[in-house]
Amino acid sequence: MTDIALKVARIECSADAIRSVVLVQADGAALPGFTPGAHMRIHLPDGDDRPYSLIDFDAACDAPDHYRLGIRLEPESRGGSRYMHDLAEGDSLRASVPKNDFALAGGDGPVVLIAGGIGITPMISMATALRAGGRPYVLHYAVRNQGAAAFAERLAEQHGDAFRLHLDDQAGGPLDLAAIVASADDAAQFHVCGPKPMIEALRELAVGAGYDKDHIHFELFDAPADQEGDTAFEVELASSGEVHVIPPGRSIIDVLEEAGEDLIYDCQRGDCGICQTDVLEGIPDHRDVVLSDAERTSGKVMQICVSRAKSPRLKLDL
Ligand code: FES
């Protein structure tokens, strides 16, 4: 089974511009289970799809009677959040079965969960599972202000002192990641979901403090935004010699797939590493969070879901 027919059972307002959508199986049948950190891809009417993390407050993700998603309305989005915000109770939609690319680290050691903004969604299921399993954990949740703190009240009730809400406006600045890393147990596993600068900063701090890379797990909550000054560039395929133009606002994957190329990819945010492609000529403009500094500097590989080019043309091993 690759797809599920779902129905909107309930819609709740969780914070400014954030909706919580509760879905059930359209025919009333049992839903497939999932593991903390999992997402499902919601199919949009235009044929595209978008990933959304599954939220479990009840330690019931093995055999859920509903799926809960949290969606922030993005005025500049490519359509996914607008579609999800326009849904009404009783509406039907289709989604992929749950998949997990951001699994909770195994073992019984302490876990540090760090969420920025809507990056809280996968962290909720992780915190629920950690609490249920009696494993030590702390959940840091950073938002601009109280109005943006989706699910905060329920998280405070469920997790007590293990839940640390950071409001930028009250604290006078962003979450102090350096202090979090400095106070973490030597054996801690870090899980971070938020914007790219948060993930990059946490990785740098944790690696600098001596944590092994396999103790640092991350997921971007959204694809990197287009940047001002983005321009078109060409991609040459080594196998065929074909040249395609990648305009601003479209990814290499978007253009090549439309041209009939069979590509392997998943997150389309630059964090899973699956679309990594060898660069034979040209200079990539890296926008992912998955490559190491050495890989970036080498310019020999790139993530074609988000990264672009600094040179007029890239020749890719495709
Ligand atoms: S599809 Fe995940 S990094 Fe490109």
Image: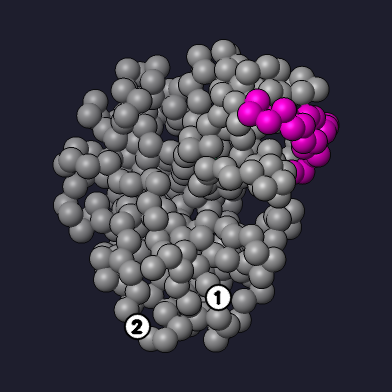
Magenta residue check for 165: no
Point out residue 187 in the picture as x, y percentages from the top left corner. Answer: 22, 29
Q: Amino acid at mark 1?
A: Leu
Q: Please tell me whether residue 294 is drawn above or below residue 46 in the rendered image.
A: above
Circle on res. 29: 2
Query: Mark 1 — residue?
Result: 93
Q: Please, which colouring scheme is shown?
A: one colour
Determine the image quadrant of residue 217: top left
Asked if one can make out residue 249 in the rendered structure from this viewpoint, the answer is yes
Q: Nearer the viewer, residue 164 or 116?
A: 116
The span picked out in magenta is 229-250
**How far apart in space, not on screen, are marks 2 and 1 (Cα)?**
15 Å
Point out residue 214 in the picture as x, y percentages from the top left corner. Answer: 32, 29
Point out residue 102 in the picture as x, y percentages from the top left corner. Answer: 38, 46
Residue at the (35%, 25%) spot, across then down? 213
Instruction: Assign the N terminus to one quadrant of the image.
Output: bottom left
Residue at the (37%, 40%) spot, across then down? 191
Point out residue 157 in the picture as x, y percentages from the top left corner. Answer: 33, 63
Residue at the (61%, 39%) spot, across then down? 305
Asked if one can make out residue 10 in the rendered structure from this viewpoint, the answer is no
Callout 1: helix, strand or loop? strand
The earlier-in-sequence mark between 2 and 1 is: 2
58 sits left or right of 16 in the view: left
